[in-house]
Amino acid sequence: MARMISYREAINEALALEMRRDPSVIVMGEDNAGGASAGSPGEEDAWGGVLGVTKGLYGEFPDRVLDTPISESAFIGAAVGAATAGLRPVAELMFIDFMGVCFDQIFNQAAKFRYMFGGKAVTPVVIRTMYGAGLRAAAQHSQVLYPLFTHIPGLKVVVPSNPYEAKGLLIQAIRDDDPVIFCEHKALYDMQGDVPEGAYVIPFGEANVVRDGDDVTIVALGRMVSYASEAAEELAGTGVDAEIIDPRTTSPLDTETIIESVERTGRLVVVDESNPRCSVARDISAIVAEEAFGALKAPIQVVTAPHTPVPFSDVLEDLYIPSTQDIVNAVKTATDWKR
Amino acid sequence: MARMISYREAINEALALEMRRDPSVIVMGEDNAGGASAGSPGEEDAWGGVLGVTKGLYGEFPDRVLDTPISESAFIGAAVGAATAGLRPVAELMFIDFMGVCFDQIFNQAAKFRYMFGGKAVTPVVIRTMYGAGLRAAAQHSQVLYPLFTHIPGLKVVVPSNPYEAKGLLIQAIRDDDPVIFCEHKALYDMQGDVPEGAYVIPFGEANVVRDGDDVTIVALGRMVSYASEAAEELAGTGVDAEIIDPRTTSPLDTETIIESVERTGRLVVVDESNPRCSVARDISAIVAEEAFGALKAPIQVVTAPHTPVPFSDVLEDLYIPSTQDIVNAVKTATDWKR
Amino acid sequence: MTATATVRTQEGLSADKLRDAYRMMRTIREFEERLHTEFATGEIPGFVHLYAGEEASATGVCTHLDERDTIASTHRGHGHCIAKGVDVKGMMAEIYGKATGTCHGKGGSMHIADLAKGMLGANGIVGGGPPLICGTALAAKIQGTGGVSVAFFGDGASNQGTTLEAMNLASVWNLPAIFVAENNGYAESTASTWSVAADDIADRASGFGMPGVIVDGFDFFAVHEAAGEAIARARAGGGPTLIEVKFTRYFGHFEGDQQTYRADEVARAREELDCLKRFRARVTETGELSADDLDAIDAEIGQLVEESVVEAKAAPLPTEADLLTDVYINY
Amino acid sequence: MTATATVRTQEGLSADKLRDAYRMMRTIREFEERLHTEFATGEIPGFVHLYAGEEASATGVCTHLDERDTIASTHRGHGHCIAKGVDVKGMMAEIYGKATGTCHGKGGSMHIADLAKGMLGANGIVGGGPPLICGTALAAKIQGTGGVSVAFFGDGASNQGTTLEAMNLASVWNLPAIFVAENNGYAESTASTWSVAADDIADRASGFGMPGVIVDGFDFFAVHEAAGEAIARARAGGGPTLIEVKFTRYFGHFEGDQQTYRADEVARAREELDCLKRFRARVTETGELSADDLDAIDAEIGQLVEESVVEAKAAPLPTEADLLTDVYINY
Ligand SMILES: Cc1ncc(C[n+]2csc(CCOP(=O)(O)OP(=O)(O)O)c2C)c(N)n1
Ligand SMILES: Cc1ncc(C[n+]2csc(CCOP(=O)(O)OP(=O)(O)O)c2C)c(N)n1
Ligand SMILES: [Mg+2]
Ligand SMILES: [Mg+2]
């Protein structure tokens, strides 16, 4: 019964399904149509975005898949404007690292319209963007940065951890009436997973308990969910039974599920690929430490990348990215901890 | 002996002193010279920036105070580039809210040069910027946003809480060889304080213990330091003796001083005007909860603005900004807490 | 190098249309003059940027627009709001921060918006609007409504990358979009003759593949004609236009500005160039409207603005519950 | 509307200068061709964008520059690095991620920089460089060094707001800055004929108050002459220039690109237009250099690049300690 497809295909399928279902859904981004709009001499639909995620959509929806010049402020802003006018644009901000040239349209415009305008605006825009290290793409193409978006009231932030999640969360994102930042980990695009063919939604703000356990709670985000699962297998061998929670969305955040778990396990490890300062990991840690203080048997451990840019050299990048071993060590620190 | 000047004057004085001392210091920003560079028919040096902070500098240093077009990416980038070439530019990003149109030059360029280039770049640029609520300037002119800069490795972030701090920290910022985001609270510009006439520096990463106390530690940032002091006075009347710590810089952060204090008091309240998610408040909370867990007698309390944009109406804005009463309440929660 | 010549005014507006245009300009003027007075009392919170002197631009453009069309504005947005039909009383209440305001008191002068009227907001970010109207224009194009979108922006904003990118995108996508550069000579205290490296902002049009037009912004008819041409072309699928409107603002950058950066160009403008005076002279000379017609409108508008202030002052403030609503759809 | 006519080539370079120019172009070509081969083995990490075909641009410009001058480059930066004198072996080691690399293996292909050589970095952000060179140009102006700064950027980057803003700022501040738009016809798979709404990128110059020039990018002499004029003017205080260089890149956008978006324009370019072939034909025809001269350079460079690869492969990797250094001055 299983139908295995990749994270990339799951995203592509979510887009295709929603475009079929709702003519107001449009897709735009650099090379998203793939040179076709350019009337260039080559094959139509040549690229489908730099890593091929939108490939094939142009063929089916030639009027609703748009290439853009390299003008992120203009086209992300256009997506935002179009969302106020009855469309449901899905704009691709190729690498999340490029937010610096268009952040204003996201955080001062899209995120604030509804509040500033006294509740009279609806801005159903989705910004798909690639994040994360692992491709040897160095400091300007490997960042995580979802903490920056999570900070901003008015934005919803999604970090799918596998193909199934990616599809259901993207369909929800497209149908959602608020601006959504949809963060795709580029090292997951080839990850295979069992994904139903039809449309389904995964609601925002509902964490997924990936693994049940009683000794320690591990909250992990995006690609780190797989790492946490590996760590849990290893820990199981040493008699430590870890519960793994994937929040799925960093904003809204399902604090309830996390706190309920920590109240049972008494221990928490939060795993986040981002830099540590003002990270989602520390955010979750602080919330839990405030709300479940009485239940904590050990200090919350936070596993993140170091406070450095992402290095290029593969040997350094591998050291930079939080590892399964880092998670195992953090769990051990928590379980071994004595007052 | 006291020489009372305003926060605005303290900043102006720091700029003037450093410009006299070091010919490589230049100042730039919208209307920083004040229309003079425009060769416009009006008075030279008319403005000195929108709230007059650089007023008078153009007269003394006509070649080193530059007006700019409204092109934040270009001129902040120019400041960054100039810093790599032997100048020490102090660029004014008028309101911190405008970072969205120029963030790339700050976080992908200035912040990363040294690391990406294998330690071979030195980028001594200062970006002065106004933050904070209180002027009824609404959602796009009142944000705090220093958490976003604090997240980025390679940046230093300064949040002076009074005129004395502003002057010493700005002189340090100008002499510092790393990129510095210098966050001036616009509601503090008219605050008076005792400030020495000459130049002095306040080192980064060294917190200031504003008030000694044994019952609870209050860490407060920027404008919130005054609020914390008021709260401490009120609490003193109820027999609660609060220690107040002003970290001065959020990056680097003096965790030592904070932890040493919490180890004594057993209780921590962190006060930050920013939105709560991925805030500096939660960051500090998480660090302390991890490193001083054994010392904590109560859950750390975090006092921030709510997860909303800044509202316009004065009645709403006053509710939005953390208040002295909020701090008092948080301290009471901490001191009253029982397992 | 000037991209294109000034467009000469022509005519052909019905008396009703002329009355509407005059009413629009007069409403803006009255609204702004009154705010200037009221601001001085200290009762109005925050930053207020007045549009007085520039009425012919918003009016000359918006008289061509209808409910299919969208505009995006700037920090100096009252005139555009009024011209696009936003309720004057709601606006005044908004500027006073009242619960009855267009944005429930949560936006204020710099953020008045009314999407139901196709007014996508004043904007606190210089250059914030042009990308947005590429989106509303795209929506109109995809939905086939025949709608056009207009971005108003200042001379200062013409140097902002977002504005420049948006012009290119509008051409590349062949959008029904109009870019109206309101050149009032200054961005805060900085002269446009200095900050705009071209002779005219309109010179930038050719670099982005669109016609560039310069008009006398004190002349309603000049703006109206240039905008009419551009909007008709855009509706017909002919793509975007850049219109540079030149004039002087009558007050400071914001209320409180001492304006030491400029010599007194305002007195002469008010005396000799004023758009309302010129409009009155022209339509009474040609006999298109009578002085009585115009006086009646003046009185009507005086009354409306007076009421708007009285009502705004008396209106209730937002309440604590409002702080936490409308962040997202569900709260 | 074409802003200005193509500049015709003239001459007057000494044999030594010609040899240097040829050596520079040949080094770039050899470096890139070799990377193309090596990349296919899978040993090179990350994204690699090759400059082959565009050598005359970096060379035609940088042969005018000296240690006072700074350039900023792009993701396609190897050619600019080599032309500004960055050590070829250090570059190769950097691309392999080795500790002996120009950036200690921490930057990689997209971030090679050597500030001591006035090379302010390849840049992973499209449009990242133009603002930066406004700063280095400003520093040169304030310090009175006579230095000029050059931003190289692509046709795609010519639509980025940062690039457009920088051009205006350079004019407003009258900076010794040169903007070199390298129009190779594509930004990734997107044709510049589509993404640039003007006929030519050079058409944008007048909107930012500077001369705009178009040159044949396969012709070293054409680039050299146009750049020489612009740089001389900038050094003399005459302000910035925009130079559009037109040509074709020989490889895909990055290594691995199947290039299904373009018909095979490369074969013809390599055959008929190639800058190295044309240079050789021209200087041997005129007798300025002999075929032996050029062959000797070819051999020398073949040897250099071969060594650079051998040494890079053998070089040590960075170590764990390197992860946490050079974030700030003090750690
Ligand atoms: C991105 C950004 N930069 C700077 C400002 C501050 N600011 C507000 S209005 C203004 C001047 C705008 O000038 P112009 O575009 O000519 O419009 P005008 O005020 O003359 O109508 C400036 C610099 C801002 N709001 N946003
Ligand atoms: C701000 C930003 N947007 C998008 C990209 C992704 N990207 C890298 S190179 C490139 C194409 C650049 O085209 P062009 O400027 O013509 O340079 P070329 O590759 O042709 O040399 C794109 C879209 C980026 N690196 N930065
Ligand atoms: Mg202006
Ligand atoms: Mg190109």
Image (cartoon, coloured by chain):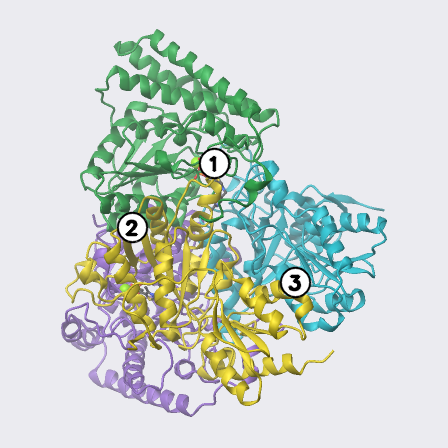
Chain colours: A cyan, B yellow, C purple, D green
Q: In the image, which is nearer the foreground, mark 2 or mark 3? A: 3
Residue D133 place in picture, x, y as percent: 33, 43
- Ligand 3 quadrant? bottom left
Q: Chain of mark 2?
A: D
- Above or below, D227 against D158 in this view is above
Q: Is residue A300 left or right of residue D320?
A: right
B175 or C149, which is in the foreground? B175
- Quadrant in the rendering for residue A5: top right
Q: Residue at x 53, y 47 (%)?
A: A309
- Above or below, A97 against A338 in this view is above
Q: Amino acid type of disc 2?
A: Leu
Q: Examine the rendering and report whether any part of residue A134 can be seen.
A: no
Q: CA distance from mark 2 to mark 1?
A: 30 Å
- Which residue corresponds to mark 2? D169
- Which residue corresponds to mark 1? D103
Q: Chain of mark 1?
A: D
Other residues around mark 1 within 10 Å, as few (<14) / some (14–19) / many (≥20) = many
Residue D71 place in picture, x, y as percent: 34, 37
Q: Amino acid type of disc 1?
A: Cys
Please state, as top left, top right, bottom left or bottom right, where the C terminus of chain A lies in the image: bottom right
Q: Chain of mark 3?
A: B
Residues at marks 1 and 3 on the same chain:
no
Q: Which mark is residue B290?
A: 3
B24 or C217, which is in the foreground? B24
Q: In the image, which is nearer the foreground, mark 2 or mark 1? A: 1
Q: Residue at x 81, y 49 (%)?
A: A233
Q: Residue at x 46, y 15 (%)?
A: D303
- Quadrant in the rendering for residue B102: bottom left
Q: Which mark is residue C326?
A: none
